[in-house]
Amino acid sequence: MTCFAAGPEWFRAETTLGAVTMRTQGSRDTPAKCVALSIYEHVLHAVNAETLMREAVRCDERFLFIRDRAIDLSEFASVNVFGAGKASAAMARTLETILGSRIAGGVVVTKYGHAEPTERIRVLEAGHPVPDAQSLAAGQAIAQAASALGEHDLALVLLSGGASALVELPVGGVTLNDLQKTTDALLRCGATIDELNAVRAAISRIKAGGLARLLAPARVVCLVLSDVLGNPLHVIGSGPCWISVEGVLDPWSVVRRYGLENDIPSSVRRCLVSTESRASRLPGDLRVEHEIIGDIHTATEAAARAAVKARHRPFVVTASMRGEAREIGRLLGGVAHDLPTGYESSGVDVLVFAGETTVTVRGDGRGGRCQELACAAATIVQGVPDVALLAAGTDGTDGPTDAAGALVDGNTLRQTREAGLSVEDALARNDCYPLLDAVNGLVRTGPTGSNVGDVVLIVHASAR
């Protein structure tokens, strides 16, 4: 990580991590901002799909080892790879370097711009967070490839956050437009990922164990990079390989909770209230082995290690951060405001939070949950010296923007006012992106090859 002044009022920080180049601009070359960026860099390295795959997967001439599980490859006629998610292409590329010519083929689908070069596994791109025509095409491609497998084949499924929108096979009567309207309505009302995926699963032939059924009778092993708190397998990617109804939310109750009964298409309403559709998802005799190779705790542990290495004293407050982004932002802004004095006796100068907040869309602006959180925090931490707050996703994207998140400090609010902008107005219109861009407060990474959730770092660091 290199932080350097490029003028009296701003700085740029750059670092390179494999294919990831991170750039941000902000007010002056502050030690607190440099520390926050450096910790974030280490987090991205720790949760990168290549890093995690190489830690979890290895093979020799005969066996494939996934953690403590040994799979005798001589028992299978072929090994095929399937998957979906923002990190699935990076996972597939790494798996090719591990298994090489043992891989016969397969299909994975990722978000536009997140593809990786592969030789044996076909990589497709599709829409996120709202599915598009390519999401349906990807579902058809996976279904077609899966239909060729038999009981003597091995299917490795690479699953990461974002899979729910990226690959789809809707149930009969549900169109792409129906899917888009339903997804958009749930996203705009602030539904949690658990709630969103419960509805998605009920109108899909690939979710809620659907992919496992398509792959049967092959042996299926699913490697999971989790972006959901608690790692519930029926929620991550809407559980394409999870054959169970235990813990699954009732989708119609989700729609009623947000008053969306009249906002979703009639075809979706009929499916959600149908007891027959839910009965068809009851467990059969299929069994799929799952292995979590990384999650939000991987990120928080990496943040703590990086802070210690930089001679700071960190404290991981929670890996279960959730709630409305602006409300959490104001709360964490208060924590940042008090950090220089409130933790003085303990010596703690880096606080780590992680999880996933939500945004209830009220306006038509641009932004994301991390940007809203940071903007709200800036209104509270104003004027406090030597403190910075970084809020960013581990996937390199925050909402429908090119930013991973934002970096603010005690000067940010003053800068917005000097630029003739209002944080309060930006929050009211869900339009934090242009405001943060104007004061050089955005963090941009590009695709990171990962997705385990969001991190928030609050750092107190003064020049020594």
Image (tube, helix red, strand yellow):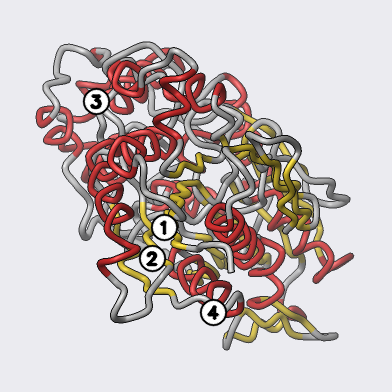
Quadrant hosting residue 309 = bottom right
Secondary element at image label 1: strand
* Amino acid type of the residue tagged 1 in the rendering: Ile
Residue position for label 2: 351
Mark 4: amino acid: Val
Q: Residue 298 appears at what percent x and percent y?
A: 50, 70
* Residue at position x 44%, y 23% in the image: 416
Of mark 1 and mark 2, the one earlier in the sequence is 2
Mark 3 = which residue?
A: 189
Alpha carbon separation for disc pair 1 and 3: 29 Å
Residue type at tag 2: Leu
Q: Quadrant of residue 282?
A: bottom left
Q: Residue at x 54, y 21 (%)?
A: 132
Relative to 205, residue 450 above or below: below
Question: Which label sits in the foreground, 3 or 2?
Answer: 2
User: First in sequence: mark 1 or mark 4?
Assistant: 4
Sequence-wise first label, 3 or 2: 3
Graded by Cα atoms within 10 Å as few (under 14), some (14 to 19) or many (20 or more), the crowding at tag 3 reads some
Q: Residue 276: x, y in percent?
A: 20, 37
CB atoms of marks 1 and 2 within 8 Å? yes
**Local secondary structure at mark 3:** loop
Quick one: label 1 or label 3, which is nearer the N terminus? 3
Q: Amino acid at mark 3?
A: Cys
For the residue pair 86 and 415, the one nearer the viewer reads as 415
Residue 164, compared with residue 232, is above or below; it is above
Q: Position of residue 434 (x, y in %)?
A: 51, 19
Q: In the picture, which quadrant includes the N terminus?
A: bottom right
